[in-house]
Image (cartoon, rainbow, N blue to C red):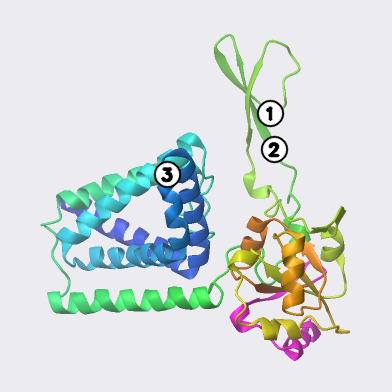
Amino acid sequence: MNIIKEFARYAVGALFIFSGIIKVNDPVGTAIKLEEYFQVFAADIAPFFEWFVPAALFLSVVLSVLEVVLGVALIIGYRMRITAWILLAMIVFFTFLTFYSAYFNKVTDCGCFGDAIKLTPWQSFYKDIILLVLIGVVFWKRDDYQPWLSPRFGAIKVIGVTAFMTIMAIYAIQHLPFIDFRAYKVGNHLPTLMKNSEPLKYVYIMEKDGETYEFENYPSEGGYEYIEARLTNPEAAAKITDLSIWEGDNDYTDGLLSAHRPHLLIIIHQLEKVSTDNIDRIRNLTYSNPNFSTWIVTSSGYDKIEAFRHKHQLGAPVFFADATVLKTMVRSNPGLILLKEGTVLAKWHHNDTPLTDEVIEIINRQ
């Protein structure tokens, strides 16, 4: 039993630390996922969940840092009664959340490990069931764990981890994630990621006379009832499936991604939440330049973005894209992306808006 007890301690602690660090790396991404959950719960359970949407970023930081702190506290055996109770409360909540998402197919990616590891809703639920069992062991044996450190040094370690992780999360919010796990990271060639790496293969699940059958090719014989088609090589599927940039009735996606001339995209997710703290530096990048073209890409309506553009004297044409896609492209509102022939050359948070000469230097290095 002692082996199971210690295994539960280290397995849960390590998983919580890993999961928390992944989220601390990208608090804005976690906040986006929390907003999605709150909106689903507001529509399905109770309207008051909508109240939590404005606090999503704050809650993202709190929950992400708490995961790491709980993992550390568990491993060093710090105040195990409190630690075990909080762990149990969190896993019960998250197990309900992932079950609800999986059963009702509401949120297709739980965000448990950010963009680093994608899990299906049911995979997330099964993961939480395993964690629930392990945390149950921790809770049951909470008084049997011996602390590594004295209460004083244990407190210093926990406080230190809390402070360090909070600073890291705030830095990631004010700049960009330390590690970009998304398909739009610097160096990626977007047109390649928009194609399947090999032909997709499916297994067709059919039913006949109460029996279930699987076919590699859709059966031509009659009498079968179609159940579902299951992809057998999902790793070959395109990593980017929803990138589309348009203006009016014209689609400019292919033109942008094939253009030899570099393009600097000023990404504005939503005007209602856009920061104007560095708008003067951004404005300088919209002036006509022989080395690159500058586009404003937004999900907001034409009239609103035009009023915003004229108010801040942004001398760049406006194009449109889906808000979710723009949030995936860059975790900053506004944010900047430099593209050439479909390759991401650089990305910036608006707090790190480059000078024109810096942009030209990056282009000349290619």
- Mark 1–mark 2 CB contact (< 8 Å): yes
Q: What's the residue type where badge 3 is placed?
A: Thr
Whether 4 is drawn above or below 65: the answer is above
Q: Residue at x 21, y 53 (%)?
A: 138
Q: Is residue 73 left or right of residue 354?
A: left
Earlier residue among tags 3 and 2? 3
Image disc number at residue 98 = 3
- Expressed as whole percent of the image width and height from the top left, the position of residue 39 reads 50, 48
Q: What's the residue type where badge 1 is placed?
A: Glu
Q: Residue at x 45, y 76 (%)?
A: 170
Which one is nearer the viewer's eye here, 51 or 237?
51
Earlier residue among tags 1 and 2? 2
Q: Residue furthest left?
A: 143
The residue that label 2 is drawn on is 201
Q: Nearer the viewer, mark 3 or mark 1?
A: 3
Whether 94 is drawn above or below 245: the answer is above
Magenta highlight range: 340-366
- Expressed as whole percent of the image width and height from the top left, the position of residue 319 reads 79, 63
Image disc number at residue 216 = 1
- Expressed as whole percent of the image width and height from the top left, the position of residue 357 reads 76, 91
Q: Residues within 10 Å of mark 2 (few under 14, many from 20)?
A: some
Q: Residue at x 81, y 58 (%)?
A: 246
- Mark 3–mark 2 CB contact (< 8 Å): no
Which one is nearer the viewer's eye here, 348 or 205?
348
Residue 362 in magenta stretch: yes
Q: Secondary structure at mark 1?
A: loop
Q: Is residue 135 left or right of residue 267?
A: left
Q: Quadrant of the C terminus?
A: bottom right
Q: Secondary structure at mark 3?
A: helix
**In the rendered image, is residue 52 in sight?**
yes
Q: Nearer the viewer, mark 3 or mark 2?
A: 3
